[in-house]
């Protein structure tokens, strides 16, 4: 499994922007998919965006055109650029990684600790 460390959350006014980062670390692993999920109070955790090795990306309908996911494979880091933020984007954002251990060939599904994003005037 890998360890995920997130950064970049905070408070912003509606229409503002934030950039989240998530760095993966560990030994003898390869990342298959990295992504972002979010959970608002009283709601289930939901997918925001994912980026699979090979370049395919997937976005929730609610963030298409406003959020952009990208990866730096050399740094095992995934980013989420969030523009035109709305109050309904307020949530705890969690980084997720699906990886393969190159020794055991086992797959792992790991989560970061979460970072709060608050959009409010």
Image: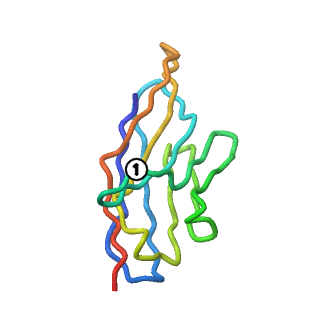
Q: Quadrant of the C terminus?
A: bottom left
Residue 82 x %, y %:
50, 69
Residue 59 x %, y %:
60, 56
Nearest to the observer: residue 102 or residue 63: 63
Q: Residue at x 36, y 37 (%)?
A: 3
Residue 57 x %, y %:
65, 50
Q: Residue at x 34, y 80 (%)?
A: 120
- Compared to 8, does 53 lie above or below? above
Q: Residue furthest front?
A: 42
Q: Quadrant of the N terminus?
A: top left
Quadrant of residue 40 in the image?
A: bottom left
Q: Residue at x 37, y 76 (%)?
A: 119
Residue 35 x %, y %:
51, 48
Nearest to the observer: residue 30 or residue 92: 92
- Compared to 48, does 105 lie above or below? above
Q: Residue at x 43, y 68 (%)?
A: 89
Q: Which residue in the structure is indicated by mark 1?
A: 45
């Amino acid at each position: 499994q890998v360890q995920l460390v997130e950064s970049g959350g905070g408070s912003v006014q509606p229409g503002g922007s934030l950039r989240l980062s998530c760095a993966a670390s560990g030994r003898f692993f390869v990342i298959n998919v990295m992504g972002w999920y979010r959970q608002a109070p009283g709601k289930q955790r939901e997918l925001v965006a994912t980026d699979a090795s090979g370049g395919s990306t997937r976005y929730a309908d609610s963030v298409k055109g406003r959020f952009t996911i990208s990866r730096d494979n050399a740094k095992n880091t995934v980013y989420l650029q969030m523009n035109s933020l709305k109050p309904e984007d307020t949530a705890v954002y969690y980084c997720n990684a699906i990886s393969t251990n190159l020794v055991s060939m086992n797959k792992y599904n790991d989560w970061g600790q979460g970072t709060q994003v608050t959009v409010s005037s």
